[in-house]
Amino acid sequence: MAAFTMLTPWQATSLHYNINICHYQNQNVYNSTKTINKAKSSSSLLSYHPSPVFSSLSTLAKSNMPPTNFSTSGSKYSWLQDNSMHHDASIASGLRQGPIYSVFPSKPAAVSSVQDLYEFICSGPLMDKVGLTPEKIAESIDKWLFYGSKLCRLFQLNELYLTIPQKARFYHYYIPVFVWCEEQILQHMSKFKDGEEIPPLVIGFSAPQGCGKTTLVFALDYLFRITGRKSATLSIDDFYLTAEGQAKLREENPGNALLELRGNAGSHDLPFSVETLTALSSLTKEGMRMNLPRYDKSAYSGRGDRADPSVWPEVEGPLTVVLFEGWMLGFKPLPTDNVKDVDPQLEMVNKNLEAYYDAWDKFIKAWIVIKIQDPSCVYQWRLQAEIAMREAGKPGMSDEEVKDFVSRYLPAYKAYLPTLYSEGPNGSDPKRLLLIEIDEGRNPILAD
């Protein structure tokens, strides 16, 4: 259930942007029942029937929001000033049920509030990348309001008083990416004839550890569900070798710190990956079910092991989309001398990487790549997470353990990220690739 916090008048007015829905400036606009009915009939949102107020706002938005030219001068800048979007693991354990609170009360709202939100959406750094224009946003403003309301419920945020970072995370990041994914799904479906079974579209998310990809996928999965699509989520972590397989890998590569623990190419069960992704691609009919593998990182004192199948979540067909995320998805093998210049231990990892295209990348038809400016950010992000865990009374790695852990990934980042960013993932279609650059605060930015 969404949590509503009562703010004092001073707190409310101190917010840089506030949907001031209780301020009546144009009450007479809502006196026309025809306007409300027209808005109802124009709504095209899947599985969504807007309330009269919602519909009124949609119609007014479409009629009163002219195309706007937004200045984006300057090289790069962040759209978020703090990292205030976090989700607790307990949220991901199941989608909460309960009453849904509208962004708007039952009383008329000021048109200027919707205008402000419209302009805020249009100013986002991903608009051009995902093919959105002010006109398209105005036409679908009801969907944006609906998605924003649902995300507030998911993350248990106050819909009436979102902070600037929270609004930007929803309206500048999660929802634009969702809109892009929806377009990819429609393109995928258009390739099949009526009556043909349509396999789910596999969307790959390649992003360094700690940059927020898991939370992004979590939000997208939820939006797919509430709009009537069946989706499944997977991580490359789910395909790590069992504890026994990891022990064998260490024995076969004595002295190679990059293969001592799970993580790098070679530490995954590739046949199991192929089996799982093939089965998911075949989940095209009602009643078809399968369980998704999961990995227990806490087993064997943190060395990890595959979780017991009894706790694997079940998915049911027909699936529309599979969201597959991982820190090294799309990495391409490089000439041996190139990787040895980064770290001699990377030579075996590079050799192992040759088999990963057939096991992972060939299943992925659309890609989202989250780009970072400096791989050292990974250390800071991981350190922040471990400090937060320790402060919450949960077991977490020490600063030295974090440094050792991240050091096993940095050589691969330094070797493979430049090619990933310049050429795209292995076998990817440039027309079906979304590259999102983020800053050290995990926030989308305008690239040069």
Image (tube, rainbow, N blue to C red):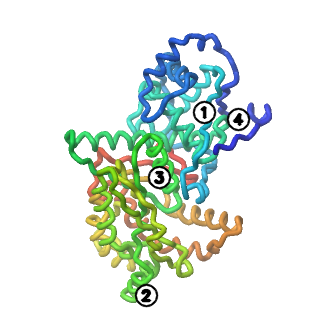
Could you say where residue 422 lies in the image, as x and y percent from the top left?
Answer: 34, 54
Dividing the picture into quarters, in which one does residue 402 lie? Answer: bottom right
User: Of discs 3 and 1, which sits in the foreground?
Assistant: 1
Residue occupied by mark 4: 15
Q: Earlier in the sequence, mark 3 or mark 1?
A: 1
Rounded to the nearest angstrom, the CA distance separating label 4 from label 3 is 29 Å
Front disc: 2 or 3:
3
Which of the two discs, 1 and 2, labels the residue nearer the N terminus?
A: 1
Real-space CA distance between mark 2 and mark 3, rounded to the nearest whole angstrom: 36 Å
- Which quadrant would the C terminus be assigned to in this image? top left
Residue hosting label 1:
102
Q: Which is more toward the observer, 60 or 37?
A: 37
Q: Position of residue 49 (x, y in %)?
A: 49, 29
Q: Is residue 296 above or below residue 38?
A: below
Q: What's the CA distance linking mark 1 and mark 2? A: 58 Å
Q: Secondary structure at mark 3?
A: helix
What amino acid does circle 3 point to? Val
Residue bearing the label numbered 2 = 255
Query: Which residue is at 59% across, 63% downward?
Result: 380
Q: Residues within 10 Å of mark 4 (few under 14, many from 20)?
A: few
Q: Nearer the viewer, residue 156 or 210?
A: 156
- Residue denoted by label 3: 217
The residue located at (48%, 23%) in the rendering is: 68
| Crowding at mark 2 (Cα within 10 Å: few <14, some 14-19, many 20+) | few
Q: Position of residue 263 (x, y in %)?
A: 44, 72
